[in-house]
Image (tube, helix red, strand yellow):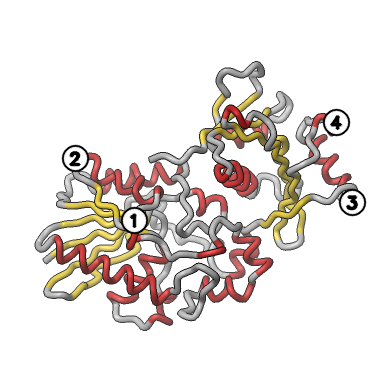
Amino acid sequence: MTTIYLIRHGQAEGNLYRRCHSWHNGLLTLKGREQVKALEKRFEGVHFDAVYSSDLYRAMSTAGAIYRPRGLTLHVDPNLREIGAGIWEDVPWGQLLHDHRDSLAAFLACNPSWQVEGSETFPAVRQRIDQAIRRIAVAHPGQTVSVVSHGCAIRAGLSAFLGLAPEQMCQIPLGDNTSVARLEAENGQIRVYRYNDESHLPNSDIPKASISYGIAGMERSALRFRPLRLPQEKALYLAACEDSCISFERSEPDNLLLALLGDHAAGVLQMNQAREPEKGAGWISLLWMTPEFCRKGFGVQLLGHAVCTYRAMGRQLLRLECPPGNSLLRRFCLSHGFVPAKNVDSQNVLEKYIGLEL
């Protein structure tokens, strides 16, 4: 009998920034790295003969919790990837909700007929994962193997192993990041011993509020972005500059975005793409939340929009100048991986490395 531990990757940028990251590459978050440490501790003393992973960064980084302490080789298999989302890749969920509500509802319900340009279908990913797991089991008879994959892909595979019809896939709850399923393979059969095991995570016994999934969850949690309209919305822009201790005169007029939850203004993001491209840096000139949305966890989506914008341009550093009077912004940035910038004149400049690396 072959034992397979099928593991979801740690929290990644797409999870935190509320963006559609299926085949789009992103890094683990600070929380994700803590989850991976907990995963490593959970499997201390457990023997593994092989470790497999999707070829996406967030999965390979998670697999390090298993293969690195044991000196094993990581086997990378693109067939273990998440469902491909085609033209939806790296689009904020809030934007998809606004532009493609019915199609998004079908996606969130794992509807077998869901498909957009360039995407896979749920039956296709179900077949892909099923076949990949079976190949791994055949290659390791009588051994113990770790396989790191992704949320929808794991649900699709589990639905096949549990004998559910494709349209019943959504009956399987989506496990938290680094949740574990244990499979047992023998004589061509795969039995699900358990799944969505999160016992290694803090507070794993506390019921989770279903805020992230389903249309209602998206309506409460996912922002979209559009250009801020000047002069019609200048008053909002001036309020953002004043509250952020930034003068209107020194603000750049381009790359100015309004973040919205539905039709409600939630924040303002301004980027200066012309500043320091030769240094591989991307600058945020303004990151501000309206009073209604301040301190409610939405600011990270503005940060994520800047990260993804600049990474797509090949920038490796994200920088902003935090005025001395804006302690709230400074605490926010430090909690999301910023550090005091090196080799700059001002002590108020903070930076975050955003290059893709394992």
Q: Specify which label sits upstream in the sequence, 1 or 2.
A: 1
Q: Specify which label sits upstream in the sequence, 1 or 3.
A: 1
Q: Is residue 52 left or right of residue 27?
A: left
Q: Amino acid at mark 4?
A: Glu
Q: Amino acid at mark 2?
A: Gly
Residue at 64% across / 61% down in the picture?
94
Q: Secondary structure at mark 2?
A: loop
Q: Residue 54, labelled with which disc?
A: 1
- How far apart marks 1 and 4 lie (CA) works out to 48 Å
- Quarter of the image for residue 345 reads top right
Q: Secondary structure at mark 3?
A: loop
Q: Specify which label sits upstream in the sequence, 2 or 3.
A: 2
Instruction: List the residue tagged with mark 4.
Output: 249
* Whole-percent x, y for residue 63 in the image: 30, 48
* Whole-percent x, y for residue 74 in the image: 25, 48
Residue at 39% across / 57% down in the picture?
205
For the residue pair 54 and 30, the one nearer the viewer reads as 54
